[in-house]
Amino acid sequence: MIRVACYIDGFNVYHAVDDMSRATRGADNYLKWLDPMEADGYFADRAVHEIVSVKYFSAYATWLPGPYARHQLYVLALENSGITVCSGSSKRRTFFARTAEPCSMVARKRNLMSIWLAT
């Protein structure tokens, strides 16, 4: 058997599913509760590969009460299914972008996520 470790970038998975859900007007919203232990079967053949660990990397958007609470529930479900959750930090900052009007700026919010290196 080939030993496999799965590393999941929670931020990118969530936003890919969220974009897909918006495109289908919410029809794919259930995918936000993806079970990585089941999904890894799509990427690894269990007859050949032994999944030795699954690690989920993410950070909470604490400034968004609703999504923050749902994310906490999702992380609890992941931990209860045997997945190792690695929590990072996230912060929000304001930056300014030019608009179509000359000499005009508009404030935008952007989430900054920490970067994880798998070792």
Image (cartoon, grey):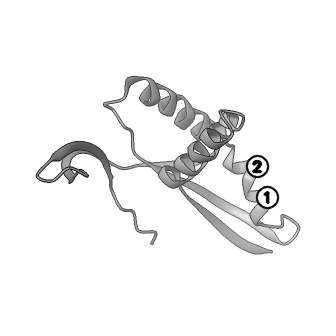
Residue closest to the eye, 101 or 111 = 101
Q: Is residue 75 above or below residue 84?
A: above
Q: Residue at x 33, y 56 (%)?
A: 114
Residue closest to the eye, 99 or 22 = 99
Q: Residue at x 72, y 34 (%)?
A: 27
Left or right position of 104 against 56: left
Left or right position of 46 against 20: right
Residue closest to the eye, 1 or 101 = 101
Badge 2: how crowded within 10 Å, few (<14), some, or many (20+)?
A: few
Q: Is residue 27 above or below residue 36?
A: above
In the picture, the quarter occupied by the N terminus is bottom right
The residue pinned by badge 1 equals: 41
The secondary element bearing badge 2 is classed as helix
Q: Is residue 10 above or below residue 69?
A: below
User: What type is the residue that disc 2 sits on?
Assistant: Glu
* Residue 12 position in % (x across, y down): 51, 54
Distance between the alpha carbons at the discs numbered 1 and 2 = 6 Å
Residue closest to the eye, 27 or 73 = 27
Q: Quadrant of residue 73?
A: top right
User: What type is the residue that disc 1 sits on?
Assistant: Gly
* Residue 5 position in % (x across, y down): 63, 66
Q: Are marks 1 and 2 in contact (CB under 8 Å)?
A: yes
Residue farthest along the left direction in this orientation: 103
In the picture, the quarter occupied by the C terminus is bottom left
* Residue 57 position in % (x across, y down): 47, 53
Q: Residue at x 63, y 46 (%)?
A: 20
Badge 1: how crowded within 10 Å, few (<14), some, or many (20+)?
A: few
Q: Quadrant of residue 79?
A: top right
Q: Residue at x 67, y 62 (%)?
A: 52
The secondary element bearing badge 1 is classed as helix
The residue pinned by badge 2 equals: 38
